[in-house]
Amino acid sequence: MTLRLYNTLTKQEEPFAALDEANRRVSFYSCGPTVYDFAHIGNFRSFLNADVLRRTLELLGYEVRHVMNITDVGHMTDDAVADGSGEDKMQLAAKRLLEDKKSGKLPTDAKDIDPNDPYAVADFYTHAFLDDARSLGLRIAHEVQDAPELMPRATAYVPAMVEMIQTLMDKGHAYVADDGVVYFDVQSFEEYGKLSGNTPDRIRSGEGGRVDEATQAIKRHPADFMLWKPDPTHLMRWPSPWGEGYPGWHIECSVMAGSLLGEEIDLHSGGEDNIFPHHECEIAQSCCATGKPQFARYWFHTRFLIVEGEKMSKSKGNFFTVRDLIAKGATPAAIRLELIKTHYRSNANFTFQGLQNAQRQIERWAKLEQWLRMYQDRPLPGSLTAEGGGPLRMALPAFQEALKADLNVAGAIGVLSEAASKHAVGGDPPQGDGGATYGDELEALHTMNTVLGVLDLQREAIRGDDDERDLIEAKIAQRNAARANKDWTAADAARDELLEMGIAIKDGPEGTTWSRIVK
C-alpha cells in the first residue's frame, strides 16, 4: 500500500504520488509562524504534524525539500478577512514591546531589543521560534543552520512580490482601487472557493467568510483581497509602481514557495485556520500568475488544539508556549509526543495527565533502547523470533502501514508499544544460537523513532542530569526494597521524598517508572 493522504482540495483520501515520482523527490511548503510573539502549542501542533509527514515520506524513501516561511510583515490582526484588515502584527508587536519597556515588563532576554525597530522585534521572535522548534525536534529547524533559504523571511522577497503583482495586473487578474490599494479580482479565477467552499457567490451573500465593510464600496467584489497597500507611514515599507507601502499576507507565500520550490509543488501544509482566506488566496494568485492548473497538488491541514477541554485563552490561564511547559517541568520529548499522538484531522485535547503519560511511555522506550544496546551483539532466542526477525523488526511493516493510512500516528505508536512489550527489559536476556540479534531489534526501534522523533530528545534531556537520575533511581530502589519487606511506612516516605523532588512514580508490569510532575 502506498501512502494515502486526505487532500483538503479534493475532500478525500488519495494515494500520494510526487511530481518527480521517478526520482522520489518531494517539494513541500509549510506556512510557518508570524514572528510577532512566542509560538504557542497550538501552532506547534501544526508544525509538528508537518514534520511527522516529512519524516514519514523520508522513511518511505523520498527525498524531501521542505520550506517553511517566516512571516515578518503584512500579516494583519484580522486575518479572517480576505483583505487582511486591522493592524500589521509586526507593528502591533513593536507597540506591545514599547509599552512593556516603559512599564519594566520586558522579558529578560528581550531587554536589548529596540521596540521602535520591527526588524529587531522579528529577529528576536524568529530566534525564539527556532530555539523552540529545535527543542521539539523539527528537522527543518536544524537544517536551516546550514541552509537558511529553507526558512525564508517575507521581507527578503518583497521585490519578487512586486513582480508577481505586476504580472497579475498585466494578465487582468488584479486592479488598483480608488483608495490606491491593489486587489486581486476573484471573479477572474473560476476555481476560487474550491479549497474552502467559500465561493464568490457565497461570500457576496454573506454566507462564507467575513468581509471588510469599509472597503466594499471601492472593490469589484467583497471577496477581492489585498495584494499591495500604499502607506508612507507604515514602519516597514518598500517602493512599488503603486506607491511606497507593503504587501498583503497571501502574496508572500505564493512568491516564497514559487521561488524556492517551483511554480507547481507537491505538498502544502498549515493549520485549519489557514484554509480560508490564506490558502484559498494563495491558489488563486499563484495559478493566475503562472498559468499552471494547480499550485499545490496535496493540501494537508491540522485541526485545532484545545487544552483540558477548553479553547486556549490567556484569560483562562490555559494558553501555553513550549517554554511555559518546559518551565513547568515537561520535557520536549513528552510535549512532542502529546502533540502528535492525536490524528491531525481530529481536534486534539492537550492535557497535563496526557503529558505525564507521554513521558512514561517515552521512558519505557528509552529503557528498552538502553537495554537493547547493552546486549546488541547477543543472538535472539527462537522464542522471540518469527521468520528470522524479532518482535520490533517484524513490527516494522505494520508500523509503516499505520503511517501510510493517512498518517495514523496513534496506530503506529500502538504497533511499537505492543512489539516492545514482548521484551522483558531489565534482566539478563535469553540468548539464542544465531540469526537475528538484539542489535537488529535496536535498529528497528531507531527506524520507528525516525518518525516519532522522541528518543533522541529524551537522550538530550537526561544528558548532564546523571547525578539527579542516580538519586531518583536510588530512591525508587529504596522504596521497592521497603515494599518487598512490607515496610509500608518506609515505602511511603521514599515516595513522598520523590514527590517533593517533583517526581511521580507508577508501578506496572515492566517495573516502576517515573516522570516529572508538570505543574
Image (cartoon, grey):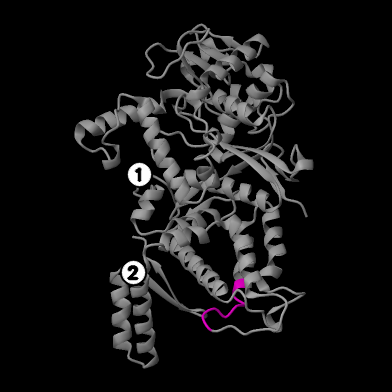
Identify the residue under disc 1: 314
Task: Name the image quarter holding the C terminus.
Answer: bottom left
Write down the region rendered in magenta: 420-427
Identify the residue under disc 2: 468
Q: Nearer the viewer, residue 404 or 394?
A: 394
Please determine whether, in this image, residue 230 is positioned above or below residue 312. above
Q: Main secondary structure of the magenta part?
A: loop
Q: Is residue 41 magenta?
A: no
- Side of 222 relative to 187 (left or right): left
- Side of 47 relative to 53 (left or right): left
Q: Is residue 195 visible?
A: yes
**Residue at image point 29% right, 76% down:** 496
Task: Name the image quarter holding the N terminus.
Answer: bottom right
Please determine whether, in this image, residue 370 is positioned above or below residue 307. below
Q: Which residue occupies the extreme bottom position in the image? A: 485
Q: Position of residue 247 (x, y in %)?
A: 50, 19
Q: Tell me the SS state at disc 1.
A: loop
**Residue at image point 61% right, 68% down:** 442
